[in-house]
Amino acid sequence: MSDWTPEQIPSLRGRRFVITGANTGIGYHAALKLARREADLVLACRDPRKGEAALGRLMNEAPGANAELAILDLASLDSVRRFAAEELAKQRPLHVLINNAGVMALPQRLETTDGFEMQFGTNVLGHFALTGLLLPAMERSSTIGNPSRVVTIASIAHKRTHLRLDDLQSMQSYSPMRVYQQTKLADLMFSFELSRRLRAEGSSVMSVAAHPGVAATDLFRTENRSGFVKTLRSVIGEAISIFLNTDAEGALPTLYAATAADVVDGGYYGPQGFEEMRGETVGPAKVAPQALDKSAAARLWELCEGWTGVCFP
């Protein structure tokens, strides 16, 4: 495990991947590496213009890649359902779903089209619904020797908070970073709970999680901010790319979780450098005790089912 590199990824010909937020950052760099290993890719992106640009860039950097663009807005449950319905209608296999897209530390409380707090609605509810709706395709594609995988991207930020089950929509109070931290904790708990439920059902589909450490992704260059905040976050992002991880390096744990043979069901992986913030070596990541609370995870699951209307098969 300690000497794993993307060059060890075997040929992925015939393996089909859906990656949310694949037009930029970690999602794009994961897609690029997978394309170079002959994977069949679906770049699931919110913005058609940015998605088309990313697809064009991918085809230039990985000539002959088998990749397509699909429009998916995780902040709209109608969009999630439409994407899933179109995906299932194709009757094609789905071997790996990478729940990567997200928004971070929005300066003010915004809501999704369905009325949920934007960070929680996008980072958690959108991916919860997407996973549940696509699970039948993953079940059909999964085998004991080569199981399908759900890879959910969490964060070391999950260690700095506790799940506020009484205010997941941040109606009582809103703190940009606290809410982001809570969504990443919820994502990790979802990954663990999904693994437990799949095992209880006798499914061969795996649920694993990964985090990028601290990487200079577009989360540090978010739109809808003041000029000063945009400049500050841009400077922070450049400093991170120099001293911590670039977005390409940040994609390594995602690639490991999605492809490595020794990944275990219910595992959580990240960089092994200082405080898990950086490093080209990937291994098991540290889990905060609150992420292992099975009772809270079960309650979170019930709430997500109720809010999204999606019940897993």
Image (cartoon, rainbow, N blue to C red):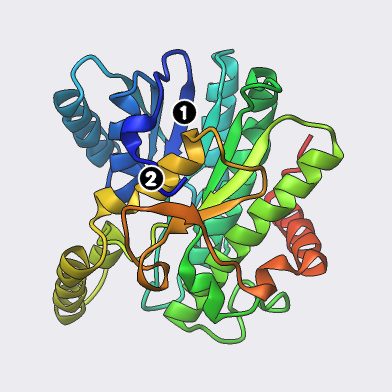
Q: Which residue is mark 1?
A: 17
**Residue 235, label in figure:** none
Q: Residues within 10 Å of mark 2 (few under 14, many from 20)?
A: few
Residue bearing the label numbered 2? 3
Q: Callout 1 environment at 10 Å: few (<14), some (14 to 19), or many (20+)? A: many
Quarter occupied by the C terminus: top right
Relative to 284, does residue 180 appear above or below in the rendering? below
| Residue 24 horizontal side relative to residue 149, left or right | left
Location of residue 47 by image quarter: top left
235 with respect to 311 (left or right): left
Q: x%, y% of residue 167?
A: 66, 78
Residue at image point 23% right, 14% down: 64
Q: Is residue 86 above or below residue 135?
A: above
In the displayed structure, would residue 244 be above or below residue 271? below
How many marks are shown on the rendered structure?
A: 2
- Where on the picture, by quarter, is residue 190? bottom right
Percent across and percent down for residue 156 are 47, 69
